[in-house]
Amino acid sequence: MPADTPLPMLGGLSAADFLDQYWQRKPLLIRGAFPDIESPLSPNELAGLACEEGIEARLVEEHGQDAKGNPQPWKVSHGPFDETTFSRLPESNWSLLVQAVDHYVPEVANLLETFSFVPRWRLDDIMISYAPPGGSVGPHVDQYDVFLLQASGQRHWQLGGPTDDEAPIIEGIDLRILEHFEVAPGKDWVLEPGDMLYLPPGQAHHGISQSDDCMTVSVGFRALSADEAVTSFADYLGETLPSSKRYSDAGMTPPADPGELNDEALERMRRLILETLDDPIQLAQWFGRVMTQPKYVDQLVPQESPTPVEELVAELEAGGNLERSLGSRFAWRALDDSQATLFVDGDGLVCSPGLAQAMASNASIDADMLDYPGAAALIAGLLDRGSLSWPGDGAFEEDDE
């Protein structure tokens, strides 16, 4: 779709206009972004996910109690939960949050495609929350972009101003709730089903459920912090550097003071570090790997035995097709006119540019994909490692009970 095409989900803005005017700059309220929305999960189904081992879930209670029965302004519990947990809850003032629901429910994963005006590798996951009246996680700040889509019920949103890392937070709880929150003029709305709110990083916000069936879909984006990026890139480079690349001071002049670390020595070390880091080819290879790393390292389940390539080809030619596994991440980058790197779940595989681009898109993985040279072996390898799967494998089965 052309970048200047108006998008109803962006309130009639084009992708180009949204990215230029709002992305990472200022909030945007979009009424009726998804006018025909139906919540992809019921509250019971969301609670069922929260009871599963290995699924990241939190229960946030306002006016709760600690393990000794002492009152607490906020209490956070981590899953997996059980029926007893939910049966003891009051009729108001709590929230259930389940992370990475798109990794388990295909209907939720499909929502990510509607946000493809942002690079796929920037998307992180979809969190879904449920809350009865008064349910909230307190006023807080996220350090990443987020779209907050109302799936059912109503939620009252209030925005403060941009807030930095030094803002005081309430101590003693496993939440970064702001000590002080002041609503900005005109930034006070109730969202109905289908309404959506975009928030850039660093934007203070507070959402409170207004109904018995309040479910909110949060589409979050991946953004490395500077300390994560520097540490990760240095570690990646460190694995490739020869031990002979060292500090050197050939041609130095006699020091005025043998105990002094002088400017010339520091400049030599600075040049060594900067020249080592300033490697565009290695930067691209590291960046592709780090931005496609799975959110959870045990999310992908490898095959017990290698897939025979000829059997895979026969299955695809008979009309079968493979799917990118829920939670799996793909990206690509051209190396030259004949080769590219396909980045998959933290690894880099060299193949043709056409194959890399197709695999990193939403194109069907069927017999047509075999037209690319080397496709059969690459697809078999991705199936073996768990990045690809046959339809229906590994999806969470929804239950209306």
Image (tube, grey):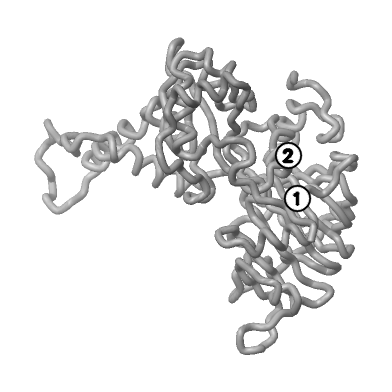
From the image, tell me which residue sits under label 1: 217
10 vs 310, left or right, is right
Q: Position of residue 168 (x, y in %)?
A: 63, 67
Q: Residue furthest left?
A: 254
Position of residue 85 relative to residue 32, above or below, is below
Disc 1, SS: strand
Label 1: how many Cα within 10 Å (few below 14, some 14–19, many 20+) = many
Amino acid type, callout 1: Val
Residue wearing tag 2? 111
Give the side of residue 80 with respect to residue 309, left or right.
right
The N terminus - image quarter:
top right
- CA gap between label 2 and label 1 equals 10 Å
**What amino acid type is highlighted by mark number 2?**
Leu
Can residue 243 be seen here? The reply is yes
Identified at 44% across, 29% down, the residue is 284
Which dot marks residue 277?
A: none
